[in-house]
Image (cartoon, rainbow, N blue to C red):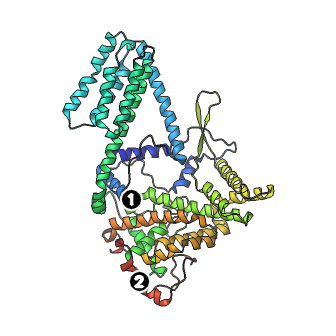
Amino acid sequence: AVALVVSASGARAAAAGGTGVGEADEAEGEKEPGAGASASVNGGDSHDDSNSVPSEAELKAMLARKLMQDPNFQLPSGNEQLDGPAGGLQAVAKMVNVTARRALWQMIRQDFGEQRYDRFLALVGELAQRIKSLTPHRPDLQRDVDEALDVELIKQQIEHADGLADWDLNPFCSFVVERLKRLEAPAHNEATARWLDEFQGRAADSGADRVALLAQFFDYCHDKLDQIGIDTANAFLRGLVPVMHEHGAQFVQEQFREQIEKGKVTLTRTNAWASAASALAKERGLGPCSAAVVHRLGVVELVLPGGALAGPDLARPFADANGMDLLPETMAEERDLLREVHAELLKLERIALAVLRVKQVVPSAKPEALQAVYGILASDVAPFVLAPAEDGSGMRVLLLGEKAIGKAICDGVVNAVGKFHELTEVDAQALRDLLVKSFDKQPESDRTYQLVASRLRSIVRGLIVPAKEERTINAKGLGKALGALGVAPLSVPVVRVAARLLDFCTRDLQIHGGATYKFTVPSGSPSASPALGPRHPVAADPTPAESARSSSTSASSDSTAEHT
């Protein structure tokens, strides 16, 4: 299961880094968008662990974290169609795979014509090894495979049959498929038997292309073996979930402490971050509060775009001005998740700004129009397209420059608004110009963006940092707060991204807690204006008496993870 998780992650990472296989579609001489797009989407920073090879213990800790993060985690089937840019990468990978397989079987066809069988027999041997690997503790079953798929015996059969045309495929193919039926989930047996019947019918045709039949057979068998491996790993993962729920945090913590003792990990960045979070809590007058509140404040201000503990560059949130890593060592294993949360928050700020630009041009914009605009802006955009090659030889992968992507989005927004409101050419051009500014890489100088970003960040802080009671109040007033900002359609994605970050905080504190983090918890009365961020109309401000009661009970009313 660990090997499959890691190999799947590695394949995705390799695909994500390998989109530059065509030519940009713009003539302005723009910089290649691959690296820029990756940094923009992932919130990239200076960290690079491409050369690090995790140990088995580290891989187990990674898997434990994954199951703690998502109890329903399952390895995806290779046949599942992905959406957005991932779906585009999947299409590219499929195209490359089909091309490679076609070339292989063209060589095998030539081999058969010249009565050379080494390449084909190598495929038989590989298939036999994959089948045997699924039953490592059953030597009797392995002997059956060795006897039925003996490459020397198969070579003699082909030679004595005077070539492939007269070789009886049925014994060979029937054994393999029947063995796969025994190994796969019973729910798939009927479909497998049906496929075998259809294949045998095609093989019985004397005019059938035997090489094409073998190519189909091997493709089917390897797809089946992939699925059997994934089903087996997922069954194993389902059995691990209760164990991870009870002991996952302890297991990950022990693995982390072991890495420290071996000198592979230090706590330099962790201690600096905890000290900065404690100082920030005191500066913002959050006392008295629990260690969990200080922890959540530190996480939010590290991940939130423009956060007090984040790096100065929005595209590299976990790097300081000198490019040094800011992310605590305790959170390094979940760097990708935190990057995704940062990127999603940054994306919501850009969407909110774009929605306000629409309302600036069309003050009476209907909710349906704004919802359509949000749908376009929230969707993922693949930085490439597949197009037929000019010479008709196949497909080309064309990288899209940033201007081309921005133009496509602007046109989509203008067209969406135009379905609900009549736009003059002047209005349409004005909207395009404002939207282009919304997509600026460095929008901090825009006064409207400053307002939108500040309010959204304040809202997100209020959903994560305070004690549970106050978070509940803020969540109930979320619709009103976003409505006052003019971006009510963002309620669902704001709640979703805040929940992801809150889940991370709970899990991280559960794993490390007081054993690793050394927070200085503020004491005394809370400030009259606790700087979680600018006040927003989430709910009516509590009375002084209510504030006192809330402060005195915050540690006991918050989540279990706060008791450290």
Neighbor class of circle 1 (other Cα within 10 Å; few <14, some 14-19, many 20+) is some
Position of 471 with respect to 230 (left or right) is right
Q: Quadrant of residue 240?
A: bottom left
Residue 425 higher or lower than 476, as above or below: above
Residue 124 appears in the figure: yes
Residue 199 higher or lower than 304, as above or below: above
Q: Quadrant of residue 184?
A: top left
Quadrant where the C terminus is found in the figure: bottom left
Neighbor class of circle 2 (other Cα within 10 Å; few <14, some 14-19, many 20+) is many
Which residue is disc 1 drawn over?
69
C-alpha separation, residue under disc 1 versus residue under disc 2: 30 Å
Q: Secondary structure at mark 1?
A: helix
Closer to us: 511 or 191: 191
Q: Quadrant of residue 370?
A: bottom right
Question: What amino acid is at disc 2?
Answer: Pro
Residue 99: x, y in percent? Answer: 50, 29
Q: Which mark is residue 288?
A: 2
Position of 403 with respect to 158 (left or right) is right
Question: What amino acid is at disc 1?
Answer: Gln
Closer to us: 92 or 521: 92
